[in-house]
Each structure stands twice: as structure tokens, then as C-alpha cells.
Amino acid sequence: MLGRVFGFLRGKGLIVEGAGKLPEGEARKVDVGDVLAGGKQVILCRVKGKLHALDSVCPHEGGRITPGPLVEGKYALCPLHNYRFDPATGENVEHLCGRAKTYRVEERDGDAELWV
Ligand code: FES
């Protein structure tokens, strides 16, 4: 019951079709709206079977966290200075900068619902 109430308050998420097929240890970029007009880029990552969502903007100096294979199969990478981020928490692994923004994401019938 409470889950339905909170779900109503959060509104409906964005459906990302086929996100359930993202392989373990991989990251995929999703554009939410027109990025040049204020939209966002979100990086979906699969670690230990679970889907996570990170904003692509790096909290260090504004580089972009990239899609592709995760470092050591579990860390998202910003190639500008090679900082690694835990997709589950957004924490920088080396603790040299702040945390990347994370978003709620839930898998559903092979797709994902994403709240940004
Ligand atoms: S801007 Fe991303 S690691 Fe420096």
C-alpha cells in the first residue's frame, strides 16, 4: 500500500526499452530530453545483476561519465581524469571529489523505469 502511495507521489518514470538486456559489467547512455536544450544524459550500469543509474556529468570538473565496459566490471569511468564511480552510490572510488548524482531505476519486463 505504502509503495503505491509513494509511487503516485513520485509520478511515472521514463521507460527505457530493452534496458533489461544490458549485460553484466556494462554501461549504456540514455538521453532524457534534448541534451542541448537542458535535457540529461544518464548512464545505466549493471553490477551484480542490478541496474543502477548515474548522471553522466562528472562531479569532479564536469567531464562525462562514459558508457561501455565498466572498470573491473563494477565502476563507471570519467575518462577526463580517469576517476571511477560506484554506480550504486555515485561515490568516487578514490574519494578525490564529490559524489555523482544517482537516479532511481527499476527493471520491469525487460525494460527499465527511470526517474530523473
Ligand atoms: S572531470 Fe571527471 S574525472 Fe575529472
Image (tube, helix red, strand yellow):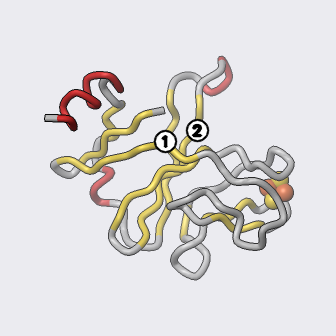
Task: Identify the mark nearer the N-term, 1 or 2.
Answer: 1
Q: Amino acid at mark 2?
A: Gln
Extreme residue toward the bottom, this view? 72
Identify the element where label 2 is drawn.
strand
Image location of residue 100, percent across then percent down:
66, 51
Extreme residue toward the top, this view? 37
Query: Which one is nearer the viewer's eye here, 11 or 13?
Result: 11
Image location of residue 95, percent across then percent down:
78, 68
Image location of residue 69, percent across then percent down:
54, 70
32 relative position to 96: left or right: left
Q: Amino acid at mark 1?
A: Val
Decide: marks 1, 2 in contact (CB < 8 A)?
A: yes
For the residues marked 1 and 2, what is the alpha-carbon distance in whole angstroms? 6 Å
Residue assigned mark 2: 41
Q: What label sits on residue 73 in the rendered view?
A: none
| Residue at (84% x, 65% y) in the render | 96
The quadrant where ligand 1 appears is bottom right
| Residue at (15% x, 49% y) in the render | 109
Confirm or reject: label 1 Cβ below 8 Å from ligand 1.
no
Identify the element where label 1 is drawn.
strand
Q: Can you say whether 42 is above or below 40 in the image?
A: below
Query: Which one is nearer the viewer's eye here, 67 or 56?
Result: 56
Q: Residues within 10 Å of mark 2 (few under 14, many from 20)?
A: many
Q: Quadrant of the N terminus?
A: top left
Q: Can you say whether 5 is above or below 86 in the image?
A: above
Residue assigned mark 1: 30
Q: Residues within 10 Å of mark 1 (few under 14, many from 20)?
A: some
| Quadrant of res 76 | bottom right
Image location of residue 39, percent across then percent down:
59, 25
| Residue at (33% x, 51% y) in the render | 19
